[in-house]
Amino acid sequence: MNNTFSIRPFSRRLAKCLLLAGVAGAFAVAGISTASAQATTGSVFGKAPAGYAVSVRSAMTGAGRTVHVDSTGRYSARELPNGVYTVTLQDNGQDIARHPNVPVTIGRGVQVDFDCSKIKCGGIADAK
């Protein structure tokens, strides 16, 4: 009897093809969910005097946020869209120092530190 047209080898080949398609489909779904979970924003983080606030504002749109420096002297502004930002150290709403033209790139963080021993925390200054 000719096995080429036998139903048994055909069903085995069909089962193997369906299994392979299922595995490929599972990897495709995993790849899709991984792609959608990729970062679409960046962040600005750093050190500053405890108790101060740090404002991160887009140079183009003015949008951004203000975060507070924690008791260890750290701050982090997350989920910022791609763009160029001005990062400003504030004390009681008054601008103390600023870092202009800080580039925020999707999926990355940029460290911006404020050190009162190098800048005058009593008045506005461009921190370098």
Image (cartoon, rainbow, N blue to C red):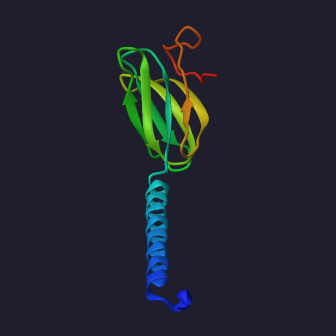
**As drawn, which residue projects farthest toward the top?**
117
**As drawn, which residue projects farthest toward the front?**
1
**As drawn, which residue projects farthest toward the right?**
128
- Residue at 53 percent of width and 44 percent of height: 107
**Nearer to me, 63 or 3:** 3
Task: Locate residue 95, reporting x and y percent.
Answer: 46, 25
Task: Locate residue 109, reporting x and y percent.
Answer: 54, 35
Q: Is residue 1 left or right of residue 65?
A: right
Q: Is residue 94 above or below residue 84?
A: above
**Nearer to me, 87 or 23:** 23
Task: Locate residue 87, reporting x and y percent.
Answer: 52, 32
Q: Is residue 77 above or below residue 41?
A: above
- Residue at 55 percent of width and 39 percent of height: 108
- Residue at 49 percent of width and 81 percent of height: 9
- Residue at 48 percent of width and 13 percent of height: 122
**Nearer to me, 122 or 44:** 44
Task: Locate residue 115, reporting x and y percent.
Answer: 54, 14
The count of marks equals 0
Q: Where is the C terminus found, in terms of image quarters?
A: top right
